[in-house]
Image (cartoon, helix red, strand yellow):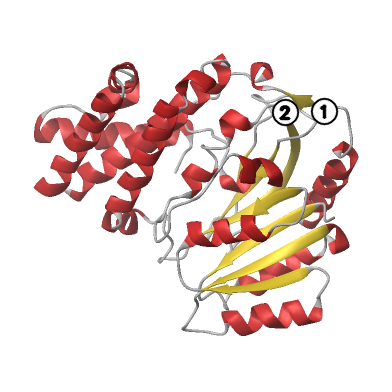
Amino acid sequence: MKLLSIAIPCYNSENYMRKCVDSLLVGGEDVEILIVNDGSTKDNTAAIADEYAAKYPTIVKAIHKENGGHGSAVNTGIEHAKGLFFKVVDSDDWVKKEAYLQVLDTLRSLVGGPTMLDMMVCNFVYEKEGEKKKKVMHYRHILPVGEMFTWEDCKRFRKGHYILMHSVIFRTKLLKECGLHLPEHTFYVDNIYVFEPLPYVKNMYYLDVNLYRYYIGRQDQSVNEEIMISRIDQQIKVNKIMIDYLVEHQAEAKKTKRLYQYMKNYLEIVTTVSSVLLIRSGTEENLAKKEELWQYIKDSDRYLYRWLRHGIMGSAMNLPGKGGRKLSVDAYHIAQKIYKFN
C-alpha cells in the first residue's frame, strides 16, 4: 500500500502542471500521484498526464473525466486513492523537496503506532507574483509542534489564521468514511474540504516545515476579487453548505470546545467574505442577497446567528446605509491587514 496519495486536479493546465508533478515525483514509490484531467479541451493537459503515467507507471495514474469543476476532481481523487493518507495539490502549485521528504519520513514513522493519525498540518508559502518576500503561514503559536495532539491541546486560532487545503493532509479512510462529497461546477469548495471532516478528526500532528508553495498572480485565478464577485452565487452556495453542516453537526462539535470554537470562527470568516463581496459589487440585487444570507443563518439557528451577527466582523458587515457599507468594506480591509487573510 502507498503511504500518500496526491490528487492534482487539472483543467487546461499544460503551462504549469509539469512543475507541480515533477516536485511530487521526488517522493518515489511511497507516493501515488493521481493526475485528474477534469475535461480539459483547450490544450495538451490530457496528453501530458498520459505521458507521466507511461513514464512512471508505478507512481503516476492519469484519470480522465468529464468536466465537473475542482470539487468534482477532488472527489475523483479521493475515490481512486489507495494511499494511507491523502493530499490535494493544485496544478499551478508545487511542494518543496526537503519539506516533502520530511513529511513522508514523519508519516512513515507514525504508521502502525499506538495512536492513529487523522490529520497532519504543515506550513504553506504564498508565492505571490512580483513579490520577493514570501509570506509563510505557520501554526507554531497555535499547535503543539512535532507530537501527536488533540483539539483540546490547541491554543485559540486568531481570526484569519486557519487550516487551509494547502496545509492539510488527511487520513484517506477518514475522508471516505465521513461522507465528504464536494459539489460539482462550484468554486471555493476548498472551504468545505477543510471544514466537513473536522468533527471526525481526533488525532493531529503539526510538522513545522514550509511544504506547500501556493502560487498567486494569474489574472484568471478564482481568488481574484473581481472574479469572486462574478461568481458570488457559488461563494454563497458554499457558505450555506457550511452553515447547514455546522447546524447539523453542532451536537458532535460541541463535545470538544476548541473544535466548535474553531468551526464557528471559520464560518465567520467565510460569511464575512461573502458579505463584503456582495457589498463591493454595489448592485441592489447583491445587497438583497446579503440580507437573504443573514436571514438564512437566522432561520437555520438563532444562537449561531446571534454569535455571528453580534461579533466584531458580523457587526461590521451589517452597518446601515451607503456610508455604513463603505465602513464595512474599510473594516474588512483593515482586518485583512491585521489578521493577514486574503
Determine the residue positioned at 75% across, 37% down. 208
Q: Which mark is residue 285?
A: none
Q: Which residue type does callout 1 highlight?
A: Thr
Helix, strand or loop for disc 2: loop
Q: Which mark is residue 203?
A: 2
Determine the residue positioned at 57% across, 29% down. 199
Q: Is residue 218 above or below residue 57?
A: above
Q: Earlier in the sequence, mark 2 or mark 1?
A: 1
User: Residue 239: horizontal and vertical position, in percent?
Assistant: 36, 40
218 with respect to 107 (left or right): left
User: Residue 97: horizontal and vertical position, in percent?
Assistant: 79, 57
Determine the residue positioned at 52% across, 25% down. 262
Determine the residue positioned at 60% across, 48% down. 166
34 with respect to 163 (left or right): right
User: Residue 220: horizontal and vertical position, in percent?
Assistant: 41, 66
Q: Are marks 2 and 1 in contact (CB under 8 Å)?
A: yes
Front position in the image: 122 or 249: 249
Instruction: Report which residue position mark 1 lands on.
Output: 115
Q: Is residue 104 visible?
A: yes
Q: Which residue type does callout 2 highlight?
A: Asn
Q: Residues within 10 Å of mark 2 (few under 14, many from 20)?
A: some
Query: Which of the 4 image quadrants contains residue 316?
Result: top left
Q: Whole-Å distance between the Cαs marked 2 and 1?
A: 8 Å
Q: Is residue 185 above or below residue 208?
A: below
Q: Is residue 283 visible?
A: no
